[in-house]
Amino acid sequence: MKPFRIHIHPPAVDEKDKDSVLSAMESGYVAPDGPFNRLFEEKLCKYLQVPHAITLQSGTAALHLALKNLGIGKGDYVLVPTHTFVASVSPVLYEKAIPVMVESSPDQVNMSPGYLEEAILDLKKKNTRPKAIIAVHLYGLSAPIDQLMELARKYEIPVIEDAAESLGTKYGDNFTGTFASQGILSFNGNKVITTSGGGTLITHRKAFAERARFLSAHAKEEKDYFFHRETGHNYQLSNLLAALGVSQLEKLEKYIARKRKIHAMYQKSGLSLVEEMPGERSNYWLNILHLPGGVHAQDLMDYMAGKGIETRRLWFPLHLMPAFKDFLYYGAGESKGWFDRYLLLPSGPGLTDEEVEEVAMEVKRFMGDK
């Protein structure tokens, strides 16, 4: 197999990013936490219009702390999508809680409100009340968050938004991650902007922010020596990585504009892509190609790899994996259909027009051979 010439979403790093990290190194704040953490948090709050942000080592860490803020513990039921990356669900198991898998719909890649309500009502019949809903915004596309939040209010279930893949995506006037009392972001190397590894918990509640910050630093009491009444976690983000985040955030809107242009170019070339909902402004983190009948995603992926072009399968349904097969599941197999009939295309903001055209050409060439 040829090495990839065109990657699916490489990080876009420039000289300003390097200068920002060098500035942090020269300041002497190399260990976790420091002035760039506070600056990054302030800039995120201003951009997203939320009062509190806590920079952390990963989006997974942010989700874990969000669950702890809600008091999720052993035996509690948490409603999660089956179509998502495992990190959206693993923190539920960290706390020995029980994930309940909820399907997508055939025409919406994110969690189905219909199946969500079916799960809530069935658990109610079993005399069980879910303690939380984790609503994930996949591939940069907003979940039907207005409907999910309406159901959450109706049944009085708190929501955590997993916006790891959708920083900058707006639904109506608000950014994904800000509809619920808590949201999480990821700045992993393949996201729209990156801190190499890193994440953030955003919240409208001061108590949640204070609790998460406390737990992220080993739950150390405010004393001049190390004293602990409870166990915490080593989840603080390095000041060096926060410095990269500060510089990257300045380019977020430029990157989103470029990614939306890439999406439009794929469309114009004749490719069938999954679209944002009415009233949505997607960051189009990864463009989702709809394959015609008779074409399998793996076959196209293998063909593109032979041309030096990286593509990727959608997330494999969690309820079909050995680690999650014994948990409750609500749906009719829709996410397996998404996995089989769709493929993710190169979508990084650093793609040139010529590279976008080459990707589209090779996809159409493969389709023409079928």
Image (cartoon, rainbow, N blue to C red):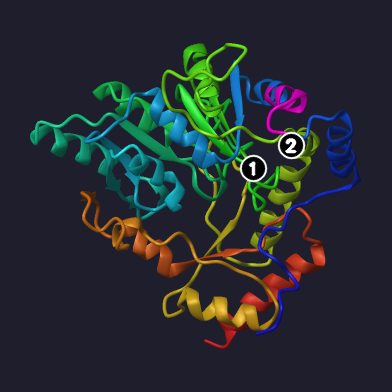
Q: Where residue 104 appears, x then y in whole percent? A: 35, 50
Q: Residue at x 76, y 37 (%)?
A: 240
Q: Tag 2, which secondary structure? A: helix
- Above or below — where is 309 with respect to 273? below
- Above or below — where is 198 with respect to 69? below
Q: Where residue 263 appears, x then y in whole percent? A: 66, 55
Q: Quadrant of the N terminus?
A: bottom right
Whether residues under marks 1 and 2 lie with C-beta atoms below 8 angstroms apart, the answer is yes
Label the magenta part by its dominant secondary structure.
helix
Q: Residue at x 79, y 29 (%)?
A: 29
Whether the magenta-drawn stretch holds residue 273 is answered as: no
> In this orientation, which residue lies closer to the viewer: 130 or 196?
196
- Residue that extends furthest to the bottom in the rendered view of this protein: 369
Q: Where residue 243 appears, x then y in whole percent? A: 78, 34
Can the viewer see residue 112 in this picture?
Answer: no
Question: Which stretch appears magenta?
Answer: 31-41
Name the residue type under label 1.
Phe
Which residue, given by chain and number where applicable, does mark 1 sit on? 187
Q: Is residue 194 left or right of residue 154?
A: right
Q: CA distance from mark 1 to mark 2?
A: 8 Å
Categorize mark 2 by other alpha carbons within 10 Å: few (<14), some (14-19), many (20+). Answer: many
Question: Which labelled disc corresponds to residue 124?
Answer: none
Q: Is residue 60 left or right of residue 17?
A: left
Categorize mark 1 by other alpha carbons within 10 Å: few (<14), some (14-19), many (20+). Answer: many
Which residue, given by chain and number where applicable, does mark 2 sit on? 245
- Above or below — where is 350 with respect to 24? below
Name the residue type under label 2.
Gly
Can the viewer see residue 300 in this picture?
Answer: yes
Q: Tag 1, which secondary structure? A: loop
Q: Is residue 325 left or right of residue 188?
A: left
Q: Where residue 349 appears, x then y in whole percent? A: 75, 52
Which of the marked residues, 1 or 2, is nearer the chain's N terminus?
1
